[in-house]
Image: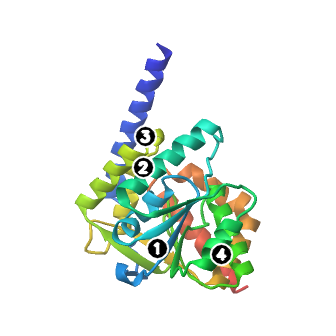
Amino acid sequence: MNDKIRTFKLKFRRFRYLIKWFFENHFNQIKPYLNYRELDSKSIKKSLILAPHADDEWIGNSQILSKTFSTVYYFQFLGNNYSESNKRIRRNELENLRKKINFDLILSDNYEDYSDLENLILTQNFSDIFIPFPIDWHQEHIKVNTILHEVLVKVDKKINLKFYHISVPFAKESEGYFLPITKKELIEKNNIFSKIYQSQYNTPISRLNYQQRLNAKGFKYYAIENYLELDFEEWADLLTYIENNYETKIKKMIFSIDNLTDIRQLSNQVYTDWKLSQIK
């Protein structure tokens, strides 16, 4: 009986949020992005996608994976559940996505030593690296940034950095590129997620889809996946800012991710505060 009650509550909560997001999407006052340009996928010669968790690569980069041939480096981060069974399940799900979409997959096998990532970047001529944007409540997304920063400093190699987002949309003043998503493609993206990532049943993929539709406000497209760009020095400065302000300004973002508008306002504020800190 308790399981049935719990299941009912979860379904009711999900339905309530679906209604909430529907109205937030249709009656929003979000300002459109003005500094994003459509990306020619043919310009991506060889891309490396860094995935902290299995599903980040698809949520943030489905169009890159679908329209270019990429290498995905999976850190095998597992949030709050580092059991061997969960590790195996998540790895198998990503393997199933690889078989369906067709990309190279590298599994990180050490949580302390990232010499394999260093080797990969040294030996492969990647034109672009896609990485989660570090203005994010999820510490494992930030951790991937610090790992990559250390690796790039060590190998002394400059590669185009393109940042993707999961639950925290980019600030409206940010700059970068986007790839359009048709309604059919967004439905297909959702279907693939649901079929492949069955362990992530509770992931609010509808909320993430609505955010990608809001990303397209002001453009002629149904939805877009956008990729923020920073140069190496800006990125390094941002990582320092995040380290100094995570507890006071960034950690609390998790409490706003279910509100499509509030999380964007917080993202705008943190981004603006960081930019202002650069000129002090």
User: Mark 4, mark 3: which one is toward the viewer?
Assistant: 3
Alpha carbons under labels 4 and 3: distance apart:
37 Å
The 10 Å Cα crowd at callout 1, few under 14, some 14 to 19, many 20 or more, is many
Q: Nearer the viewer, mark 3 or mark 2?
A: 2
Circle number at residue 198: 3
Which of discs 4 and 2 lies nearer the camera? The answer is 2
Q: State the separation of the CA atoms marked 1 and 3.
A: 27 Å
- Residue 274 disc label: 4
Task: Residue under label 1, please give it.
Answer: 227
**Pointer 1 or 4: first along the chain:** 1
**Callout 2 amino acid:** Asn
| Residue 144, quarter of the rendered image | bottom right
The nearer-to-camera label among 2 and 1 is 2
For label 1, the SS is: strand
Sequence-wise first label, 2 or 1:
2
In the rendered structure, find residue 96 and report the number of the disc placed on it.
2
Q: What type is the residue that disc 1 sits on?
A: Tyr
Q: Dot 3 surroundings within 10 Å: few (below 14), some, or many (20 or more)?
A: few
Determine if residue 40 is in view. Answer: no
Which amino acid is tagged 4? Trp
Q: Secondary structure at mark 4?
A: helix
Residue at coordinates 64% horizontally, 68% vertically from top-left? 117
Foreground residue among 130 and 224 = 130
* Horizontal side, residue 131 vs residue 274: left or right: left
| Residue 74 coordinates in the image, percent (x, y) | 57, 58
